[in-house]
Image: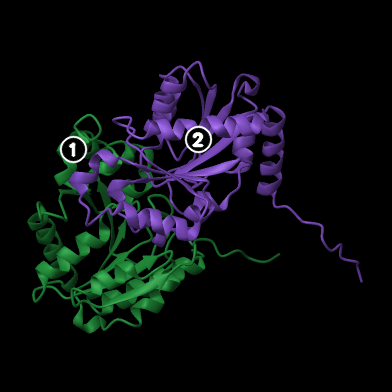
Chain colours: A purple, B green
Amino acid sequence: MKKVEVGKKILSANEEYAFKNAQILAEKKCVCLNMISSPGSGKTTILTRTINELKGKIGIGVIEGDVQTDIDAEKIRATGAVAIQINTRGACHLSAKQVSDALSQLALDDLDIVFIENVGNLVCPSAFELGENGKVAVLSVAEGDDKPAKYPALFAKAKALLINKIDLLDSVGQEDFNIGRVNADARKLNKNIEIFHVSAKTGAGFAEWYDWLAKSVKKTVGS
Amino acid sequence: MKKVEVGKKILSANEEYAFKNAQILAEKKCVCLNMISSPGSGKTTILTRTINELKGKIGIGVIEGDVQTDIDAEKIRATGAVAIQINTRGACHLSAKQVSDALSQLALDDLDIVFIENVGNLVCPSAFELGENGKVAVLSVAEGDDKPAKYPALFAKAKALLINKIDLLDSVGQEDFNIGRVNADARKLNKNIEIFHVSAKTGAGFAEWYDWLAKSVKKTVGS
């Protein structure tokens, strides 16, 4: 009978790559944030505004995950930032191997933050570690206030939640999107989650998001 | 050497259940429509309005797929219609086996249409046949007009596309949601797709959707 080595964690192929990604990012003192949401919640618009407004202060690079097209990567590149496109060709989430390949194409020495924009999907991407420092959930006001309850996995794991498109709050109506309910449901799953109420269209609420990003960078460089 | 039987299609377990579901639905002369979209596009609100407004004319039952909770099934039951809840406990799509179990709990003799409300996910559910007569895609105006291009699989397969929340069109703005672009991109993927512009909140555009449902039912019963 073969002796089983107890306590040795057997990593999946994905976890192995995630572990290596985390090591590389730590060596380069890069914060890595994995942005996850439904399609159309506004991840790309949040990133383009963030890059434009933090230009010269925080160096940002982006890894863009999409089933098809490079529409989003082109929007990021229009800001002047580097974006590495990954097309999953049907797959519903990014893998750590894909992120590893993309990281090797980024000049990490020049970057403070690497944003990973995952495939638009509120279910699958939260189950795959990519080596990130944290997951950031995005939820658009137009999606309805029951999403943390109905799709708990992401909200339970995310370090931050951006409730986006608050400019649509009046049009959507309090009966379909009660911000208090979203805050409460998200905090029930995850008492430490940071919640920001933002509009990537108007810029409302972004100052707090930028403060949080700046603190995250400071924490990672250890200064 | 063993002789290989050429031409015999080997069905996956999912396809076998889908095939059986399709047979049962055909015997009972039920139309089955598989509703697929991102979370929060308005599938449940479309169904509750449809059930309420077609009451007494078309017998409707619902199979509700959710990762967690029975929030949506309760909304359907409030209309008086029967809703069978499937909780996938983390899985990102419904399987034909789950639908088979749900179908056995529905009084199909009393129903003209069985709607399957799939898990909110624009990627995975379109890859799993459930035995339905057709897939119906739902896209909310708030999700942006690039979705058929970025998530082509569903739009290429769907028999119908409901562009929902057209009441938000002015608030979202033409620059973020150009209906002409969505129509053109969807038809490029699928020239026969039926497209309806609706608001489940106001009822706009539902008359055409109901006509299409009535025709689908008529076609199935062969009258």
Q: Chain of mark 1?
A: B
Q: In which quarter of the view is residue A218 placed?
A: top right
Q: Camera-side residue: B111 or A136?
A: A136
Residue in the foreground of this view, choosing between B106 and B2? B106
Q: CA distance from mark 2 to mark 1?
A: 29 Å
Residue A30, image x, y percentages: 63, 29
Q: In terms of depth relative to the viewer, which is nearer, B16 or B96?
A: B96
Residue on which disc 1 sits? B171
Label 1: element kind: helix
**Quadrant the N terminus of chain A occupies:** bottom right
Q: Amino acid at mark 1?
A: Ser
**A63 sits left or right of B212 in the view:** right
Name which residue lies at 33% across and 54% down. Answer: A180
Amino acid residing under circle 2: Trp
Task: Identify the residue at image location x=24%, y=75%.
Answer: B77
Discs 2 and 1 share one subunit: no
The numbered mark at residue A81 is none
- Nearer the observer, disc 2 or disc 1? 2
> Can you give x and y, in whole percent of width and height, for residue B30 in the image?
23, 74
> Where does label 2 land, which residue?
A212
Looking at the image, residue B13 sits to the left or right of residue B116; the answer is right
Task: Read off the chain for label 2.
Answer: A
Residue A183 location in percent, x, y? 39, 53
In this rendering, is residue A111 above or below A206?
Answer: above
Q: Quarter-wise, where is residue B48 in the image?
A: bottom left
Quarter of the figure with residue B143:
top left
Residue A1 seen in render: yes
Residue A104 position (above or below residue B30): above
Q: Residue at x 49, y 63 (%)?
A: B9
